[in-house]
Amino acid sequence: METQQKRAIAIHDISCAGRCSLTVALPVLSVQGIETNVIPTAILSTQTGGFEGYTYRDLTEDILPVVRHWKTLHRTCDAIYTGFLGSFQQLEIVSNVIDQLKGDETLVYIDPVMGDGGKLYETFDMAFVDGMREFCKKADVITPNVTEALLLLGRPYREGPYEMAFVEEVLHDLSTLGPSKIVLTGVYPDVGHLGAAIYDKNSDETYVAYSRAFDGTFHGAGDLFASVLLGKMLQNVPLKQALEASVTFTATCIKSTGECGADTRFGLNFEPHLGLLLPEGRTL
C-alpha cells in the first residue's frame, strides 16, 4: 500500500537559465518522491554570480495573494523550505507565510542565504543580517555556510581549515537561536576535504561528513546540498545517513561538472545523477 506523499513548499527565486534555487529544489525534491509546490520570490534571466546584464523582476507583491488562494484550497504541507530572500520586506512577508501555512507537524527549513567567502552579498547590509537572525527563530532546521553562521552569531569571519572544536562551538551557539537542527556547510579539516556538519539539539549529537575537495567555484552547490538533505529528512532517513548522502551526491555532481568542462556559472550537472536519489525500491 502506498504511503501518503509528502508535500513541501519551496520559497525561492527562479533563474530562467542556470541551476540554482527553484531550478534545483524542484527536480531534486521531486525525484525523492516529494510533491513540491513553489512560491517564486523573484525571476531572473540568470543567477547573479559571474554574470552581468541579467534581468531581475521582484515578485514580492505576488507572494501573499498566492498564499491566500492556497488557504481557500485547505492545502497542508510537511515542509516549508526557504532560500534566497532579496529584501527585508521579503523576510517579513515570508515570516507571515510560515505563520499561515505551518501545521503542527510542518518542518520549517531555512537556508539563510546572505554571503560567502567572508563577505555579505552586495545586496545586503547588517540590518538584513539582524532580520535573518530573527527569521531563523522560526526554523526547525537552518543550513548556513561558515560565513553566514558567523554573521548570525555576530562574530568576525575566520578562514579554515576548521578544527572540530570550532565547528561544534558554532553549531551549539547557533542552536540557541531556536532551531533544533543546525547544519553548517563549507567545513573542512584540511585542504583536501570539504563537507558539512549537523547538530541535533534534541539528542545532543553532532555528525560530520566530508568528501574530496575540488578546485573552483561551483554555483548552486549549496542549493543542491540543502535540497537533497531536506528530501532525505522528509523520507525519515536517519540524520547521519542523510548528511552523508547529501555530501556525497553534491560531490559527485561537482566532480562530473568539472570533468566535462561545463561552464560552472550555470550550476552543476546534476541531472544525469538524479537516479541516485530515488527512494529505495523506486524507479523512474
Image: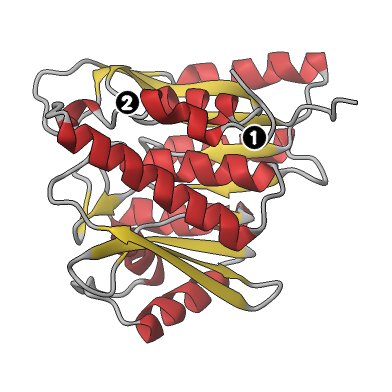
**Closest to the observer: 39 or 37?**
37
Front position in the image: 235 or 166? 235
Quadrant housing the C terminus: top right
> Which type of secondary structure does the marked residue at label 1 adopt?
loop
Q: Please state if 255 lies on the left or on the right of 217 as rendered.
A: right
Sequence-wise, which precedes: disc 1 or disc 2? 2
**Type of colouring:** secondary structure
Residue 13 seen in the figure: no
Q: Is residue 258 left or right of residue 83?
A: left
Residue 66: percent from left, percent from top: 62, 16
The residue located at (24%, 42%) in the rendering is 255
How far is disc 1 from disc 2 in space, using C-alphas?
A: 23 Å
Which residue bears the numbered disc 1? 279
Q: Nearer the viewer, residue 140 or 231?
A: 231
* Quarter of the rendering containing residue 270: top left
- In percent of the image, x 29 and y 61: which residue is there? 194
Residue found at the far left of this picture: 52
Q: 214 left or right of 171?
A: left
Q: Residue at x 53, y 52 (%)?
A: 135
Image location (x, y in percent) of residue 250? 37, 44
Question: Residue 19, which numbered label?
Answer: 2
Residue 238 in view of the camera: yes
Q: Nearer the viewer, residue 96 or 196?
A: 196
Badge 2 amino acid: Arg
Residue type indicated by callout 1: Pro
Q: Report crowding for label 1: few under 14, some 14 to 19, many 20 or more residues within 10 A (C-alpha).
A: some
Q: Are marks 1 and 2 in contact (CB under 8 Å)?
A: no
What residue lies at 53% left-to-right and 47% top-to-bottom?
Answer: 229
Q: Residue 113 at what x, y percent from top left?
A: 37, 46
Numbered mark located on residue 16 in the image: none
